[in-house]
Image (spheres, rainbow, N blue to C red):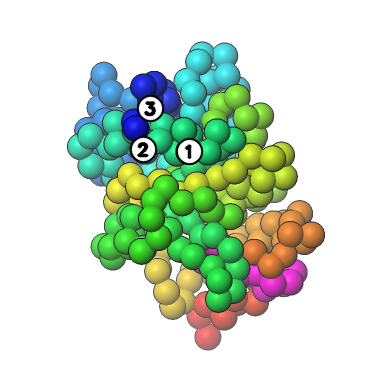
């Protein structure tokens, strides 16, 4: 496939709960330094939507093609911005209705599901065999990009969970699509990759998961990178199984 002649322009937004993490991870990325990508940070947001949606409105007026939401604990390697823009441009050329893109996701459900992505997550390399870019039905929240002219917005009811997959499902409902791209980055979350989770996090996931399950009950089953959801209550049950005895 020939490379697109026009690379999409991007801007970045993040929500900050810990300034030290932002300074150690995302802000240390070369492309986020002065003269690099345009980016903004929203401090102590009540939801991902509270940070993302105003930034989308601003970009709609200012002119970037895509807005990239990224966690404060992500680090981009040198040259990531150009890598991502090339990957995004190629995916747009392949799927003209592309409206949502991320770095790690899942296509399908059950035994037929396919994981797609290439990231370093908490020191573990995740490099799935699926060829990238890959159309997906869900995305991980660590990074999600949305086409500014798509009309899509994050749902405040999702809080800080499930909003990336919610965007994918919104796009699909509107006749658009989503994909996982090959643009390697590092994710240094302090949330345990497995085993017990803090009680506060469990309650947050339960509440936001309930909102997600109710909104998309007509689309179940849904497989996200972290949850298999067959019926309402599955998220709460899995989250409860991760609680401290």
15 lies above or below 104 = above
Residue for point 36% across, 64% down: 129
208 or 81: nearer the viewer: 81
Residue for point 40% across, 69% down: 193
Q: Are marks 2 and 1 in contact (CB under 8 Å)?
A: yes
Instruction: Kindly state the secondary structure of the residue where label 2 is placed.
Output: loop
Q: Which residue is mark 1?
A: 94
235 or 95: nearer the viewer: 95
Q: Residues within 10 Å of mark 2 (few under 14, many from 20)?
A: few
Instruction: Kindly state the secondary structure of the residue where label 1 is placed.
Output: helix
207 or 127: nearer the viewer: 127
Quadrant location of the N terminus?
top left
Q: Which residue is mark 3?
A: 4
Q: Is residue 122 visible?
A: no
Nearest-to-viewer mark from 3 and 2: 2
Residue 234 covered by magenta stretch? yes
Q: Which residue is mark 2?
A: 1
Residue for point 59% across, 43% down: 177
Magenta highlight: main SS: loop
Q: Which residues are magenta?
A: 223-235
Residue for point 48% across, 56% down: 105
- Residue 23, image x, y percentages: 28, 39
The quadrant in which residue 77 appears is top left
Q: CA distance from mark 3 to mark 1?
A: 10 Å
Pick whichever of labels 3 and 1 is earlier in the sequence. Answer: 3
Q: Is residue 165 visible?
A: yes
Pick whichever of labels 2 and 1 is earlier in the sequence. Answer: 2
- Residue 206, image x, y percentages: 65, 65
């Amino acid at each position: 496939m020939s490379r697109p002649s026009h690379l999409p322009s991007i801007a970045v937004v993040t929500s900050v709960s810990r300034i030290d993490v932002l300074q150690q991870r995302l802000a240390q990325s070369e492309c986020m330094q002065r003269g690099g990508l345009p980016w903004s940070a929203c401090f102590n947001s009540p939801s991902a939507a509270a940070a993302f949606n105003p930034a989308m409105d601003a970009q709609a007026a200012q002119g970037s093609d895509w807005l990239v939401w990224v966690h404060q604990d992500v680090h981009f390697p040198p040259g990531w911005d150009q890598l991502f823009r090339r990957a995004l441009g190629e995916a747009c050329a392949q799927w003209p209705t592309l409206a949502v893109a991320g770095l790690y996701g899942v296509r399908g459900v059950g035994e037929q599901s396919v994981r797609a992505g290439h990231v370093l997550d908490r020191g573990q390399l995740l490099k799935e065999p699926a060829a990238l870019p890959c159309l997906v039905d869900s995305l991980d929240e660590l990074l999600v990009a949305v086409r500014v002219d798509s009309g899509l917005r994050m749902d405040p009811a999702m809080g800080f969970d499930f909003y990336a997959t919610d965007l994918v499902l919104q796009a699909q409902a509107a006749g658009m699509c989503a994909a996982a791209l090959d643009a390697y980055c590092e994710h240094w979350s302090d949330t345990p990759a497995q085993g017990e989770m803090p009680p506060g996090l469990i309650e947050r996931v339960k509440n936001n998961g309930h909102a997600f399950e109710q909104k998309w009950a007509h689309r179940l089953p849904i497989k996200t990178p972290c949850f298999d959801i067959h019926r309402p209550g599955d998220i709460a049950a899995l989250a409860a199984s991760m609680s401290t005895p």
